[in-house]
Amino acid sequence: MSTQPTDQRIENIIAGMLRVGVILSTTLVLGGGIWHLFQFGAYKPEYRKFQGEPPMLRSVSGIVRGAILLDARSWIQLGLLVLIATPVARVLFSIFAFAAQRDRTYVAITLIVAAVLLFSLFGEH
């Protein structure tokens, strides 16, 4: 009996990862949006002066800290981060899946895709 994962098993794992990522992201964004409406629904926005995002929402650590403190905007941002991280996790998982199948061509191609994704996310802008 082979210890290599089958294509069907890998596809099922990837489908599950994508499903969980999208559902978790949707839940965080929706929950954060509802919580934000409860907190600031009656507040009238001021459009005459541009106000960017607070520093807390500009870094992953700040977003996580804010989410722990039950800040609604942090929950929304965390949901968006989960949505972005979902396909990246899928590509990273694919590298290990192809390596387990000893498929060097797909490992190389997927490593290139992962490098492009990670550079686009973390490279200098």
Image (tube, rainbow, N blue to C red):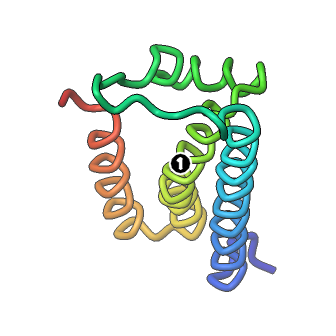
Residue 16 occupies quadrant? bottom right
**Above or below 107: residue 69:** above
As drawn, which residue projects farthest toward the right?
A: 1
Which residue is drawn at the image coordinates 51% and 24% (left, top)? 57
- Residue 106 is left or right of residue 59, and the answer is left
Q: Position of residue 116 (x, y in %)?
A: 27, 49
Which residue is drawn at the image coordinates 57% and 70% (left, top)? 101
Element at label 1: helix
Picture quarter with the N terminus: bottom right
Which residue is drawn at the image coordinates 48% and 21% (left, top)? 59
**Above or below 72: residue 1:** below
In the foreground, 100 or 20: 20
In the foreground, 91 or 102: 91
Q: Position of residue 77 (x, y in %)?
A: 56, 38
Which residue position holds label 1? 85
Residue 25 occupies quadrant? bottom right
What's the residue type where badge 1 is placed?
Answer: Ala
In the foreground, 120 or 71: 71
As drawn, which residue projects farthest toward the top?
A: 55
- Residue 71 is left or right of residue 45, and the answer is right
How busy is the neighbourhood of tag 1: few (under 14 within 10 Å), some, or many (20 plus)?
A: some
Which residue is drawn at the image coordinates 28% and 39% (left, top)? 119
Q: How many marks?
A: 1
- Residue 46 is left or right of residue 113, and the answer is right
**Above or below 110: residue 48:** above
In the foreground, 30 or 108: 30
Q: Position of residue 48 (x, y in %)?
A: 28, 27
Picture quarter with the C terminus: top left
